[in-house]
């Protein structure tokens, strides 16, 4: 049925490019705002393509004969039996969400489609416990953060509608998808068949379906939302209480990585003290044990922090519950009581990247905030972070002093000035990356002078020596002070090894 439908969708031009061409930018933008009329007008005379757009993107009810013509070679009755459509009195409506999907990072859009439960705007979600999410903001943020280097094997834990597997199909040879929900796995199988992608699909919770197996790459957008220990919605709640899903996966994933393998997941952590990294650090200790005898590189990036009220309100609305309704009030009370009992004053959210290193390579663990807004996808930055971390591991301690470093063109020095009786006086200098995550580092005047010398000609040791003479300082002391700063700047791509 799904392969036949692929034929029909391709013939009808119901693809990312086909729909874009059909709608044009104005109707597309209107549709993205939830205004369907311009799109309906745009596809009025578009034949089968128009039928698909109206059926699946606009939620229209259409005459059986129109739908039958578009679906050929699939019979309407088979599509109804498969749960894709519903039919009453010769009129047909979509019963599931089916839409073309693409990857902006790929030069040519492969014909992909994603099947999921119907969702007519977040507020209207009538999610049952097993509701299978379509491609949402979180799914896309993980896809944009995923490292896309060629690998042999890739595992997607909690595949849902299967969207991460689609994005991985361009760089991974063998794809494995797991989920605890049979309904999700049925959608994922349909997504893969429609998209012409072969993937191993395994039922079961967490890592149980892949016990004893290792993968070159693992991705997961798990039910990471911290809440009471019960499952209202399987896409959102792990049922483990608090941040149990993130703790479990961070701790257990390294044992399933090959040497050099990388795991990436969305995660959320309860913040119960001044230091948000406390809980992720504790999970990483477990992760290091599970990576043994290999080492562990880990990068935890906090993208967002919400107070408990914001956290609960956001996720209730996401599930279509008005927090002020009687149901919302009861759920909020229970959820906030749970968080209060756990001593939670905020909930953090972000990306976790884990790499299992060779046994003799010392691991690097970094937890940091990345809450500044930026548009670039995180994937290339994560790839670069992994490379820089490996490079730094090969240049431990004072070995860094023998390297020639360069400030890349994408880095600028910003100076703050204050007005004084003597005119504008400099008060602060900040090194800023103009691309990627737009990292910023405050630097003192000695740092500014050192960085000015980082043109790739002289090793750091010589630059520090010259600076020590110029400022009457001890070269060893200066080197000791400079090394951690230089390491941080290399980590953030603000100093790079000269070729
Ligand atoms: C947020 S959805 C992510 C779906 C999809 N991977 C994406 O990126 O959009 C989380 C998925 O995890 C699944 N899930 C929930 N609990 C799980 C468990 N214990 N083990 C494996 N998967 C689970 C849900 O069924 C759901 O499909």
Image (cartoon, rainbow, N blue to C red):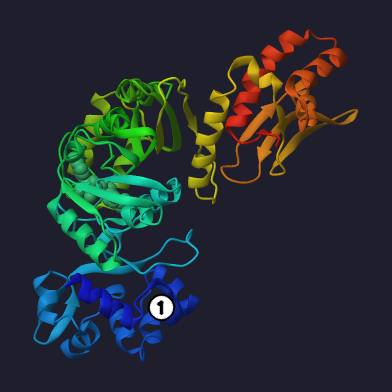
Q: Residue at x 25, y 55 (%)?
A: 199
* Left or right side of 149 for 345: left
Q: Give the x, y percent position of residue 90.
A: 11, 87
Q: Quadrant of residue 38?
A: bottom left
- Compare residues 145 and 414 and report the one nearer the observer: 145
Front residue of 151/465: it is 151
At mark 1, the secondary structure is: helix
Residue 178 visible (yes or no): yes
Q: Give the quarter of the image for residue 404.
A: top right
Task: Return the residue nearer the eye: 258 or 117.
Answer: 258
Identify which residue, 317 or 88, lies in the foreground: 88
User: In the rendered image, is residue 235 in sight?
Assistant: no
Image quadrant holding the N terminus, namely bottom left
x then y, percent, for residue 223: 25, 42
Q: Is residue 241 above or below residue 9?
A: above
- Residue 190 at x, y percent in the picture: 21, 63
Side (left or right) of 38 relative to 406? left
User: What number of labels is visible?
Assistant: 1
Relative side of 215 to 447, left or right: left
Viewport quadrant of the C terminus: top right
Residue neighbourhood size for the residue with mark 1, other residues' Cα within 10 Å, grouped as few (<14), some (14–19), many (≥20): some
Query: 112 above or below 376?
Result: below
Residue shown at the point (34%, 77%) measured from the top left: 14
Label 1 lies in ligand 1 vicinity (Cβ under 8 Å): no
Q: Which residue is mark 1?
A: 18
Q: Position of residue 162 (x, y in %)?
A: 27, 55
What residue is drawn where x is 47% and y is 79%? 24
Above or below, 318 against 30 in this view is: above
> Residue placed at 47% from the left, 24% from the top?
364
Q: Quadrant of residue 236?
A: top left
């Amino acid at each position: 049925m799904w392969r036949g439908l692929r034929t029909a969708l391709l013939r009808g031009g119901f693809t990312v490019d086909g729909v874009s061409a059909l709608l044009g930018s104005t109707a597309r933008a209107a549709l993205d705002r939830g205004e369907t009329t311009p799109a309906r007008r745009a596809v009025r005379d578009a034949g089968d393509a128009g039928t698909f757009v109206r059926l699946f993107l606009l939620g229209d009810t259409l005459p059986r004969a129109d739908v039958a013509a578009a679906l050929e070679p699939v019979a309407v009755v088979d599509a109804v039996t498969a749960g894709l459509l519903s039919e009453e009195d010769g009129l047909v409506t979509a019963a599931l969400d089916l839409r073309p999907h693409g990857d902006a990072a790929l030069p040519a859009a492969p014909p992909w489609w994603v099947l999921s439960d119907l969702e007519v705007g977040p507020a209207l979600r009538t999610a049952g416990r097993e509701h299978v999410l379509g491609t949402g903001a979180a799914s896309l943020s993980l896809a944009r953060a995923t490292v896309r280097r060629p690998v042999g094997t890739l595992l997607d834990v909690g595949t849902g509608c299967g969207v991460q597997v689609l994005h991985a199909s361009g760089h991974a040879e063998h794809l494995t998808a797991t989920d605890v929900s049979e309904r999700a796995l049925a959608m994922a199988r349909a997504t893969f068949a429609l998209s012409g992608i072969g993937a191993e699909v395994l039922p079961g919770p967490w890592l149980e379906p892949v016990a004893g197996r290792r993968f070159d790459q693992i991705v997961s957008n798990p039910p990471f939302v911290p809440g009471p220990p019960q499952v209202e919605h399987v896409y959102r709640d792990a049922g483990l209480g608090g941040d149990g899903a993130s703790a479990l996966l961070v701790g257990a994933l390294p044992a399933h990585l090959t040497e050099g393998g990388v795991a990436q997941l969305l995660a959320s952590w309860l913040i119960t003290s001044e230091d948000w990294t406390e809980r992720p650090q504790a999970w990483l200790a477990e992760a290091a044990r599970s990576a043994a005898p290999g080492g562990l590189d880990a990068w935890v990036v906090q993208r967002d922090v919400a107070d408990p009220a914001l956290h609960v309100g956001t996720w209730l609305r996401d599930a279509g519950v008005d927090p002020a309704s009687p149901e919302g009030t009861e759920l909020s009370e229970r959820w906030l009581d749970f968080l209060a009992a756990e001593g939670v004053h905020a909930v953090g959210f972000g990306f976790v990247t884990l790499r299992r290193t060779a046994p003799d390579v010392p691991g690097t663990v970094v937890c940091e905030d990345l809450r500044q807004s930026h548009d670039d996808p995180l994937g290339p930055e994560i790839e670069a972070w992994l490379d820089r971390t490996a490079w730094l591991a090969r240049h431990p301690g004072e070995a860094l002093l023998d390297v020639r470093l360069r400030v890349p063109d994408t880095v600028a020095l910003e100076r703050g000035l204050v007005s004084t009786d003597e005119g504008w006086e400099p008060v602060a200098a900040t090194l800023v990356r103009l691309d990627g995550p737009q990292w910023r580092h405050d630097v003192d005047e000695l740092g500014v002078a050192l960085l000015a010398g980082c043109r790739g000609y002289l090793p750091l040791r010589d630059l520090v020596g010259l600076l020590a003479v110029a400022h009457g300082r001890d070269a060893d002391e200066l080197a000791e002070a400079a090394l951690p700063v230089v390491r941080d700047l290399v980590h953030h791509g603000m100093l790079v090894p000269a070729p």
